[in-house]
Structure formats: C-alpha cells, structure tokens
Image (spheres, helix red, strand yellow):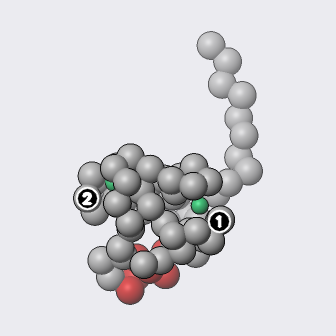
C-alpha cells in the first residue's frame, strides 16, 4: 500500500475504488513527482485520489485557468 502524496491517506483510485499499487519502483517514485502522470492499472483512468480528489495527471497543482465559454 502506498500513501497519497497530498493527503497521506492510503492512495485509492477514485474511479474504480481499488488501492493503487505501483507496478514498478519508477511508478512509486513518480508519486512524489507531480509532473509525471500516473494511470490506474485496474481501470486505466488518470489516477485520482479518492480522499482529496487530487489528479495525478502530470499537471502541477495551483494552475487555475478560467475557461470561458
Ligand atoms: Zn489524497
Ligand atoms: Zn481505477
């Protein structure tokens, strides 16, 4: 089991609800690198923490852009 890099709770995929298990040591290290996108090995969606809803999509947080329509 790994912890979410943001809220330190057990990292669970918000899309399918399974605990995220890094398939390789590189994936494990990527948890602390916000510029590296991670995908759930179970449902293949962008990994989103079930608890804090933070997406591991390779986009550093704090980037708010008002998309007008
Ligand atoms: Zn979290
Ligand atoms: Zn999933």
Q: Would residue 54 be seen by someone viewing this image from the given angle?
A: no
Q: On the image, which quarter does residue 18 sit in?
A: bottom left
Q: Residues within 10 Å of mark 2 (few under 14, many from 20)?
A: some
Residue displayed at 73% across by 50% down: 62
Residue displayed at 30% across by 77% down: 23
Q: Is residue 40 left or right of residue 64?
A: left
Q: Is the distance from the Cβ of mark 2 to the nearest ligand 2 atom less than 8 Å?
A: yes
Q: Quadrant of ligand 1?
A: bottom right
Q: On the image, which quarter does residue 5 sit in?
A: bottom right
- Identify whether 61 is placed above or below 19: above
- Residue 42 is tagged as 2
| Residue 10, image x, y percentages | 51, 70
Tell me the quarter of the image containing the N terminus.
bottom left
- Identify whether 64 is placed above or below 6: above
Q: Residues within 10 Å of mark 1 (few under 14, many from 20)?
A: some
Tell me the quarter of the image containing the C terminus.
top right
| Residue 60, image x, y percentages | 64, 57
Q: Is residue 57 left or right of residue 27?
A: right
Q: Element under label 2?
A: loop
Residue that label 1 marks: 6
Count of marks overlaid on the render: 2
Q: Is the distance from the Cβ of mark 1 to the nearest ligand 1 atom less than 8 Å?
A: yes
Residue displayed at 71% across by 35% down: 65
């Amino acid at each position: 089991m790994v912890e979410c890099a943001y809220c330190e709770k057990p990292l669970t995929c918000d899309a399918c609800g399974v605990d995220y298990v890094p398939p390789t040591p590189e994936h494990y290290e990527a948890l602390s690198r916000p510029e590296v996108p991670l995908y759930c090995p179970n449902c293949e969606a962008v990994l989103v923490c079930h608890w804090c809803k933070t997406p591991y999509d390779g986009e550093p947080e704090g980037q708010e852009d008002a998309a007008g329509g």
